[in-house]
Amino acid sequence: MKKALTIAGSDTCGGAGIQADLKTFSALGVYGMSVITAVTAQNTQGVFGVLDVTTEIIEKQIKAIFEDIEVDAVKIGMVSMIDTIKTIAEGLKTYQPKNVVLDPVMISKSGYDLLNKEAKETLINELIPLATLITPNIPEAEVISNIKIKTVEDMEQSAKIIYDMGVKNVLVKGGHLELEEKEAIDILYDGQTFNYYKAPIINTQNTHGTGCTLSSAIASYLALEKDMKEAVRLAKLYITMAIEQAFSIGKGVGPTHHFFDLYKKAGLMQ
């Protein structure tokens, strides 16, 4: 069985972070493991607190996994502190996993700043060059590339700038971009060519954890030995269905449905 490791923060309401990653791994037939970087207090209405795990424990978690179990893909999510980023980077350099998907989680949907501003440069210098793929949404891509993104051409320019920081592939997610076609477009850039992934915009507020879920789905498909273009394509199909079947849980932004396919097969939904 293929195995994937998520290095990210914990989400108390289970829609994002470590919990979303492990659900995605399981839904796609990959054995999931985790290194927890932070514990958050959050629900569908927002993030109310973050407690960072010590770098000593993060380092020991990474060592415990890699020195016992083969890792086919790594997904990195919430890393809010400079020392945390450096510790993860050292672990990646030591164990050199084949596939590393970096989801640069910076701001929650409720506006909570999840990435320490001083840590941005450390993430750019330490983690981006070690990644097989980085998956910023438009606000994140704007921060990393330091340009405003208002058009598809701006997305392409941002992808080029980020690629030049040393990453092997860049996926700029266009869900925040308002297009006349009422479609969401994501752009994958490998340093030579652009590939475009379009999907209809789904009329729902229940999108908690979509970024975590997409990046962990890509990591899953890379672990399953799909090439990058196919991994992104399949992950895009998966997240689109997960959003279509999202749950109306809580008083705010509800989570996506990671196990929609299993529920259908079990007769638990139409």
Image: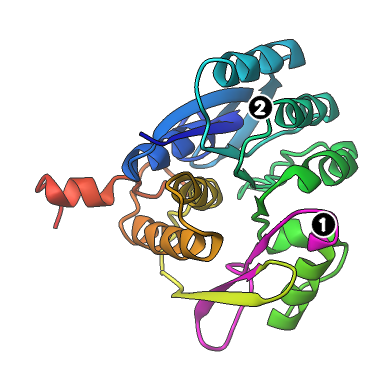
Left or right position of 95 against 223: right
Which residue in the rendered view is the most extreme toward the bottom?
Answer: 180
Q: Is residue 92 magenta?
A: no
Q: Extreme left residue here?
A: 267
The segment highlighted magenta reads 162-188
Q: Is residue 262 left or right of residue 217?
A: left
In terms of depth relative to the viewer, which is nearer, 245 or 23? 23
Task: Using the image, tell me which numbered label, if any, was put on residue 102.
Answer: none
Q: Determine the secondary structure under disc 2.
A: strand
Badge 1 element: helix
Q: Amino acid at mark 2?
A: Gly
Local crowd size for mark 2, using a 10 Å CA cut-off: few (<14), some (14–19), many (≥20): few
**Vertical arrangement, residue 64 with respect to residue 105, above or below:** above
Q: Is residue 172 above or below residue 23?
A: below
Residue position marked by numbered label 2 in the rendering: 49
**Percent of width and height locating residue 41:** 58, 26
- Total numbered circles: 2
Left or right position of 202 against 18: left
**Residue 143 numbered tag:** 1
Split into 4 quadrants, where in the image is the N terminus? Answer: top left
Color encoding of the figure: rainbow
Q: Is residue 92 above or below residue 56?
A: below
